Amino acid sequence: MTPLLPVIFLKMEAELYKYITELYPICRSITGDGTRETLRLISRHIPLEMHEVASGTKVLDWEIPKEWNIKDAFIKNSKGEKIVDFQGLNLHVVNYSTPVHEFIDLATLKKHLFSIPEHPEWIPYRTSYYDETWGFCIRHDQLLGLREDTYEVLIDSILSAGSLTYGELYIPGKNEDEFLLSTHICHPSLCNDNLSGIAVNTFLAKEMLRSDNRYSYRFLFIPATIGAITWLSQHEKQLSKIKYGLVTSLLGLDDVFTYKRSRIGNSAIDRIAEYVLKTSNVPRNILDFIPYGYDERQFCSPGFNLPVGNISRIPYGQYPEYHTSADNLNFISKKAVNDSYKIIREIIRQVESSKKYINLFPKGEPQLGRRGLYDSIGGRNDSKQLQMALLWVLNYSDGNYSINDISDLSGIDLKLLNEAIQLLLSKKMIKEL
Ligand code: ZN
């Protein structure tokens, strides 16, 4: 056994984690320079195209908001001591806070403070994208310890006309049919939620750039919700090319793999993702589509209804560290991020190899005996199963079902189905689509 493979994976684990460490301190949001800086770091690995869409642009039922940028923020007590400092942790400021510089009493300050009573050590992550206000997020134990005083609050932010920024990479394959991989890039210092998805998708894009692909690949690095809505509104004419899609998120915890089906429910990506999770023998949780979660909500909205599923480990919001300062560099596991990469890579590999065939004799059941097919299968221990494989391949090779789909429907393993396909190809009864 060669030790080369584990070495490659260990190296990959370390690279993915190092990359997450570089991205961690940046104060990202749905717009602004933190997001641009993040896209620039991604561009060091892959040739990302950056797009800017102006504030005020109508996108479907929404409008691109004002751009938000922040330089500094703090709360000082009357002695001039900084008791909360944005420079130490960007989660301290409610994302999209309006600028403020005031001297206020404790009661007024408390109206602008957020904490988590159940986890007094953690700092919550809060946003206020569509409601112009300001606030700070602090530890609950700190909040309880605050005394009557005059507090200086400063948020040096700018909320003004600018643009929304997103990154896109299109990798053409032999076929114009597309595989869409989308992840959100709008969370500040949070690792599992956000950075694990960015890291996995960047490395997947790197890999797809190196390989010779049957399908075309489109990677989107977009702010959640408004980014997906923006991209969809500007690419409506080309959406029919998307034949497979995955929204990736929450890939950093050693836990079950969760696959949430597309709204279609049994599209090719649903069948292949489920097949890969089953055959990879990993703990898994398969969920039907619900209109809540990440950007699959937008891609699977009824007017688009794209074949896009969501893959994550423990799902959306179902761990206490979710959207808190505890979702940090110590919370995620290097191995988990790498395992997530490997599973999604395997899904892509299956999509690439999942060919479709056309039955050239689709009217009635073709006569297998006359073509010598019974001779080919006679005398084998599994001749009955091979005959079944032939019948399944013939019946479902109408251009809609891939070999993986037929395996799923029939329960026949891919190896035997491939044998049946080779036999049928040799007798010119099917052809590859
Ligand atoms: Zn989130």
Image: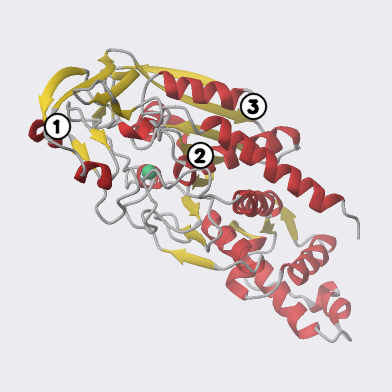
Q: Is residue 344 left or right of residue 227?
A: right
Looking at the rendered structure, the kind of residue marked 3 is Ile
The x, y position of residue 383, in whole percent, is 81, 83
Looking at the rendered structure, the kind of residue marked 2 is Leu
Q: Residues within 10 Å of mark 1 (few under 14, many from 20)?
A: some
Q: Is residue 361 left or right of residue 97?
A: right
Give the CA distance from mark 1 to mark 2.
32 Å
Q: Residue at x 47, y 52 (%)?
A: 309
Q: Is 311 above or below relative to 171?
A: below
The coloring applied to the image is secondary structure
Mark sitting earlier along the chain (3/2): 3
Foreground disc of the pair 3, 2: 2
Where does label 3 land, which residue? 46
Please state the quadrant of the image where ligand 1 appears: top left
The x, y position of residue 96, in whole percent, is 27, 27
Q: Which mark is residue 195?
A: 2
Residue furthest out toward the top: 161
Label 1 sits on a secondary structure element that is: helix
Quarter of the view holding residue 87: top left
The x, y position of residue 138, in whole percent, is 28, 39
Q: Residue at x 60, y 69 (%)?
A: 408
Where does label 1 land, which residue? 109
Q: Is mark 3 within 8 Å of ligand 1?
A: no
Foreground disc of the pair 3, 1: 1
Q: Residue at x 45, y 33 (%)?
A: 185
